[in-house]
Amino acid sequence: MLHQHITRTLLALFLGTLLLSSVVSYFTIKTNNIENYQRELESHIKIIKNQLSTTTDLEALAQIIKENSGIRFTLIDEDGVVLVDSDAQSESMDNHAQREEIIKSYKTEFAHAIRFSDSVKSDFLYVAHRFEENNRILFLRLSMNIGSIMHNFYDLWIKIALIFCITLLMGLYSAYLLSQKIRAEIDKIIANLQQIADKDYKISLSSHFCLEFLEIANYLKKLATKLEKRAKQKRKYTAKIKLISQQRSDVISAISHEFKNPVASIMGYAQTLLDDPNASIQIKERFLGKIVQNGQKISTMIDRLALTTKFENGDFTTHSSSFDVVKITQEIAQTFKEKHPLRTIKCELPEHFFINADRTMMELVISNLIDNALKYSDDTITIFIDNESLHVKDTGVGIKEDEIEKVTQKFYRSNSHSWDNSMGLGLALVNYILKLHNTNLQIQSSLGVGSDFSFKLPSN
């Protein structure tokens, strides 16, 4: 996991840094410690050198130095013979002419060397100084046991190592806390990703831990917003597909239903004539008239369906002209009176009212509105113009309030009444045509009282 990887990386980096720092500091402190003792011995040499000229008992002086400072004192002549040594008998000591520090002292004021002492059997730090006294070349050498030097160094190093260990523990604890915090942030991201996977896009992800997690949180919010928009678009598209599929089913159902009766009538009358070739002329003429009448119904329905399709596809263009709408309304009303002699159609219209519109389309609008009123009522139909609007009013069954907005939809049919051979296209056609003339159909209706269909007449 990421937080474990980060923890391991931080731990390895911390331990590596600590180890490297320990090694570097070890040798640095050790070198600095030895250099400090070298400078200390140099200071002692300067002091002791000044005392030599006034001291008669060099052996006593060597012992005093040894006792007070723990420093080994050695005085050597030009030939390398040890004159005085605080730690051994000078007579028993080897010639020191070839000792490293003695050789180096010819070239530098203070010569340094670290080596094993044969006489004391221990590693020593030696500092030798060549000087002249009473016309003699002498070498004053001071030395310290490396063991005592390193003892002090190890005391210091243990303290430093202890500090390093405490720092390491603090670092490990800090890495643990950091790991837990990263784990918590990752858990929040995973939870929100799961939420998005479950198509719940209302995520509430925020992070103030660091800039990177804040950027991730912002990107996830943007992703959720985009996915939510796409989901909404998909739902709309799916709903649209379902609607189209339903409409297609409605078309097939409506055509099947409406064509069934006239087709059945045609087939019935035709079959009767075929079965009875000796039928009288009057019966043949009546049956053939019925066949023609039902054929005209089918033709009218096909024309309406084709016209509706043209309107929907935007393939229809109007051809406007100025004409008297009162005159064509009266002509249409007279046609319906002749078709329905038992029905009363009243025209309460002014003498003239000129408009600028597509005459053929307006005839279709008025014809459909009157036809609709006749089908939905058994009483008087009144046609009048009020406030520059043409009204077709009936006192029939009326329309339910929740159906008023639906009656102009294509293939919509009332559940309580059947529109003979209409396929629910009459008012849909009216609505399409009026929209082309920048007006719309207004419907006022009360169930059991009647309906008033009207539209604003296009200005001349």
Image (spheres, grey):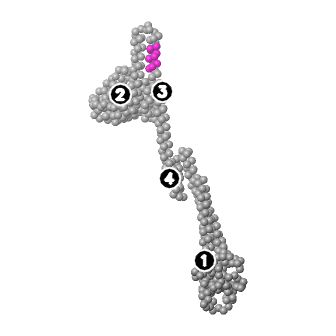
How far apart in space, not on screen, are marks 3 and 1 (Cα)?
109 Å
Circle 3 sits on which residue? 253
The residue at the point 45 percent across, 24 percent down is 258
How far apart in space, not on screen, are marks 3 and 4 (Cα)?
52 Å
Visible residue check, residue 322: yes
Q: Earlier in the sequence, mark 1 or mark 2?
A: 1
Circle 2 sits on which residue? 364
Circle 1 sits on which residue? 35
> Which mark is in front, 4 or 1?
1
Q: Secondary structure at mark 4?
A: helix
Amino acid type of the residue that numbered disc 3 sits on in the rendered structure: Ser
Between 41 and 386, the residue placed more toward the observer is 41
Q: Earlier in the sequence, mark 3 or mark 4?
A: 4
How far apart in space, not on screen, are marks 2 and 3 (Cα)?
25 Å
Residue that protrudes farthest toward the front in the picture: 79
Q: Main secondary structure of the magenta part?
A: helix
